[in-house]
Structures are given as structure tokens and as C-alpha cells.
Amino acid sequence: MICCLNPNCQQPLNPENEPFCTSCKAKLVPLLRGHYRPIRPLGQGGFARTYLAVDEDRLKTPCVIKQFSPQIQGTNSLDKAIRLFNQEAVRLHELGEHPQIPTLLAYFEQDKYLYLVQQFIEGQTLFQELHRQGIFSEQKIRQVLGDILPVLKFIHDRQIIHRDITPANIIRRQIDGRLVLIDFGIAKQLKDTTQIQPGTRIGTEGYAPLEQLRSGQVYPASDIYSLGATCIHLITGIKPEELYNPLQGRWIWRDYLLKKGINVSDRLGQILDKMLKDLVSDRYQSADEILREIGGQPLAPPTPLKTPPKPATVPPAPISPPPGARLPLPKAPLSDPPVSQPPVSNPPISRPPISRPPLPRGINSNPKTGTWGCVNSLSGHSSWVTSVTISPNGQTVASGSLDDKIKVWHLQTGELLQTLSGHSKAVNTVAISPNGQMLVSGGDDRTIKIWNLFTGSQLRTLTDHGRDVSSVAISADGLTLASGSKDRTIKLWKLTTGTLRGTLLSPAGMIKSVAISPDGQFLASGGLDNQIKLWAIDSGKLLRTLSGHFNLVNSVAISPDGKIIASGSKDKTIKLWDASTGELIRTLSDHAESVNSIVISADGKMLVSGSSDKTLKLWNINNGELLYTLTGHTNQISSVAISPDGQTIVSGSFDNTIKIWEK
């Protein structure tokens, strides 16, 4: 079948090979942009129509196409509609990458329509779940809070307010049971000074707070209100507007449950009531405040479904959302678009014996070469661990986290040596200098901080980036620091003084990862444009672009001899490239989800990868053989590191832990 893209067509499905729609006579477009094939409409709302589609260039991977189709008259209204649609693409681009916010695959104009192509999330909305399974228990409500509040922290830290949180805009992903926040079509940047016109209603009635409905003013507490309204709808099965008594000026959702013989703990009741306060100042002001109230960190998600993975199929028609609710649209990054001191060798520290727990929880080994197992799990961060690194002497681990902290640990004992506080937002990346004396960190506060690793004192702060700092790397001679950012630039610094040496611009998209060659001659970067770029460090010239990934590149690494470039991508693959020719050597493809971090051992023989599928995989870099799969983390793995002797692997995860693995 061919789907007609005329937004007014009432019967859009047509037989194959028809040049024109049999219903509306519009010309049929089998493929958008040459590879997106619309299958059928999913729904229509506002100025957009959505279609279920497949990407023919990616083995018919399901996706969602959102078509901007204005049905309005007047230049001002049309301009506003276009602005809102463009804003959705910009917001998704700014949010970059989050496992619970669908990925934007493309944004383009064709045949006088604007299109967003978004990741398809297979699952059901909480509104659908409510109608199919009945009202939510208190435990399920706590799970909703534990799953969505960290997502709100993530977007609020980036100064973005969703403005339309409802049961119809939260999908429970089928593959793992995690909740995904969708439909950023009316999300607002806090610094955006655009005034809402009188009479314009932003948000869904019953879920949006008064300040949003009356004047368009929004704050993080506005999203918190909407999440609270969502929760009382789910726990009662009644629309929020019917659970408020205007004469008494209070919410009566608990009274309703009591009449039904349903008890809710006072603690949860107090939390939801505070989320739903009329006055902004009376509510929780941040997601963190609520997370602390419910136990200090996000609650575990529901148990993943046990059904084995199967090829995605066209889902059944969804249950209609509640009246007035916006159409839930799965989404997803834009494609296309002090004095220098001599090195000091630290004296070796004796390795105390490690008490090894039983190994069956988390290994899959090759019996011919022994077994890798988890020998320690370090807990201390109150939120997701985003980055880990090991010191050159193999004795120290540093970790960065969404809790804005850096922690330094003794690798062998697991002892927490110190906590470094200085970043005002999440720490995304950490690295240790080759002489082991300095630690470098980059964060969402747009800064790079350089620390004395031994004393924990902050030596300097570098502030030239305009957006979040995603990645840092230090050259083997300890002289050059490279930093990659969401501002689409790579900056080169003199590490010992903090002097900016140069800026490399990558106009196609934000930078996710940078790596410096062992000889310090070139730099590799990966990011939102699905490509790896090689740059000459001295001249800043772009040497080569490596293309082959179908989704963003999360991590790049360079072999110790500088001959191989490795890249890990959200397309679930690792690719190995010839650094001198740019030719693809091989593709490693055993991960079930995004590859978030890769590292190559010091002898150049092994590559370690960490993935959103919660596993680490160890590969023979020479022949691509999968050597081991290590399991034990309960959430996605964000970062991996390997000790200089190749005998210890460290992994950081969104389960808030760091795990130590040894052979």
C-alpha cells in the first residue's frame, strides 16, 4: 500500500504503483527524502498529521513522520504555527540524547510541507494502559514518579519546560518497561522572551496549572504540577478537573479514593498534594526535591516485559486520547545538520587482596581464556553516573555524575577518597592527565574545570563554550586538552595554563565525543551528524570524514598505534576504520541497543563497549570476535574505562553505580 500525504485525504491508503490517490487524486509520494516510506496515518492534531513509516535504508526500521499541515488563515497565525513546529525540532536538537526522550532522525521540507522524522517507540501510552489495565496502584504511581522525575530534571537543567505532561504524552516502552516522555511540540525555553498572545491556550486543560493557562508563564514547577495531575488521573481513573472542588478550593482525589475503599499512604498523598498547589511558590521547585522525598534517588522501573525481541510490526490503532488532549507523538537529533611541571611518576601502591563475590551474577565467558567478573560495585552518587576514567598508574578511579559531583575512588579497595564539588550542573565527562596529577571535567554548566587530583583543589575554570561540554581528552604528552560541546565546536587548550589554542567548528551538529591520537597529530570527533571527523591539531584543518553510521556517534577511540579509529553509535554498532585511508575495516554488531562508550586497551588488542542494553562487551580488535559479555548493571551503561595493564575494567551506569571488573 502507498499512503497519501494529502493531510485532508479521508481515505489515504492506496494500492501499490498507483501514481495518484484514488480518493483525493493527489500525486502519491512513495518515499520521503528517498527512503522514508509512510505506511498509514497515526492521527492528526493542531497543525500536524502523523504517519507510521519505515526507513528503507535501515532495514525497514519503524519511525514516525510528523507533517506540518496548516489549516488556518492569516499570516500571523500561520507564522506562529510554523514557529511552534520549528521550535519542536530545535528543542529536540537542544535536548540532544536521553534514553527516555525519543530521537529526532531528520527535519526537512518537501513539496511545501515541513517534516519531522522521529524514532518510533513501541509500547502504549499511560492513558492507554489506564483504560486497558485499570487504575494504577500506589506502587505504580511511585514508579511513574521515579521514572519521569529524572527526565524532568534533565530537561529543566537545560532550561526547557515541556508544558504538556499528560498520560497521553508518556509511553511505556515495550522492550524494557521504561517510561518515555514524548511530544515536545509546545516545549518552551525559559530564556525565550516570546510573549503569548492573549486568548492563546498552551497546554491541556486539567493538567496545565493556572499560570500556564492564563498567561502562558511557565516554570519547572509548572511541569511538576502537570505530572501531579497525571498521577491523580492514573490512580483514580477520573479526569483531574473533576477532582478539584472550587468551592472548597482543594483537591478531593483522596476523598474519592476513600469512598472507593482505596487507601493511599499519607506520604504519597502529601507529595502529590504539594505538586498540585495553586501557587507556584507553594509547589516543589525542582524534580530533585521530590526525588529526595521519595527516597533520595529514582525508583526502579517496572519489571521489563519477558517477551523476546521480534521484528517491529505495525501497531494496532491506539485508543483515542481524552478530549482536549494533544496527540501523543513518539520522537527523537537532527541528521544532516600554574606553571608547567615535569611528569612525576607516582610510586606504585601495593594491591591489597580483593574479596571476590561469586561470579555467576553477571558474566558470560569464554572458558578457554578464563573469566571476567564483577569484583566490586561502588555506590555514592545520588544520580546517574555519566563518565569514568582510570589514572595512569591504575590506582585511582574518577567518576562524574548527573548529581553535579565528581568522586575519586581507590580502585582496589573501593574506598571513596574525595568528592569534588564545583560544577553547578551535571558532570558529563572526566579525564586524568598522563602524569596523574590533574583531573579535567566538563559539564552542563558549559565549563571545563581542572583539578589537582591529589588535593581536590580546583586549579582553574575554562568558560569559552556556549553550551554543555560533552567530552574532554588529553594528549599523551599532557600538553593539549581537547573539549567537545553541544555548541558544535571543539576547543583546543594548553592544559597547563588554560590558554585557548584554537576552535574547530562542526556545523552539522553537536559534538558527543573527542579523542586525540597517541602522537598528538590529529583528533577524532563524533556527534549528532552520524559521522566521525578527523582534524589536524596544529592547523585545525578537517582531514577526513568517515560516514557509515545510521544514527549519532556517541563515542570515539583511537588505537595505541594510531592506525585504527573506533566509533560507537546509537545505531547499536561499533565500527573500526583505517585512520590513514578512512576505509571501514569491520562492523561489530552484537549490542541490542545504543553503544554509549568504547575504549581500546593499551596493548591495542581488545576493545570494550558499554551499551544501553546494560551490558559490556569485550572484543578482539584484530578479528572482531566477541570475547565476553558482562552483565550486572540494572540500567544503561554510560561510560567504560580500562586499566593500563588491561586487567581491570570500570563501568559507570545510569543505575547510579560504578562496577569494577577483573579477570
Image (cartoon, rainbow, N blue to C red):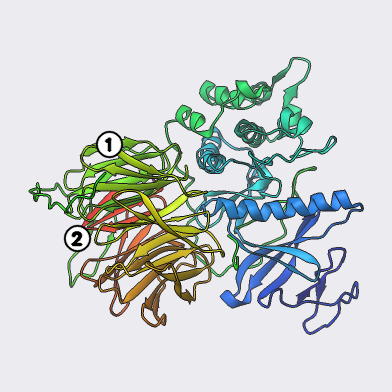
627 lies above or below 486: below
| Quarter-of-image position of residue 662 | bottom left
* Count of numbered circles in the view: 2
Q: Is residue 331 visible in this depiction of the protein?
A: yes
Is residue 453 rendered to the left or right of residue 188?
left
In terms of secondary structure, where does tag 2 sit?
loop
| Quarter-of-image position of residue 253 | top right
Residue where numbered disc 1 is placed: 457
Residue contact between numbered discs 2 and 1, judged by CB atoms under 8 Å: no
**Quadrant in which the N terminus appears:** bottom right
Task: Tell me the residue at 48%/50% (across/down).
Answer: 465
In terms of secondary structure, where does tag 1 sit?
loop
Give the residue type at disc 1: Ser
Task: Tell me the residue at 42%/60% (across/down).
Answer: 513
Residue where numbered disc 2 is placed: 644
Give the residue type at disc 2: Pro
| Percent x, y of residue 320 | 76, 50
**In front here: 372 or 317?**
372
Is residue 304 rendered to the left or right of residue 631?
right
Residue situated furthest top in the rendering: 248
**Quadrant in which the C terminus appears:** bottom left
Task: Tell me the residue at 61%/53% (across/down).
Answer: 92
| Percent x, y of residue 305 | 50, 54
**Badge 2 or badge 1: first in the primary sequence:** 1
Is residue 42 rendered to the left or right of residue 219?
right
Alpha carbons under labels 2 and 1: distance apart = 26 Å
Task: Tell me the residue at 72%/29% (across/down).
Answer: 211
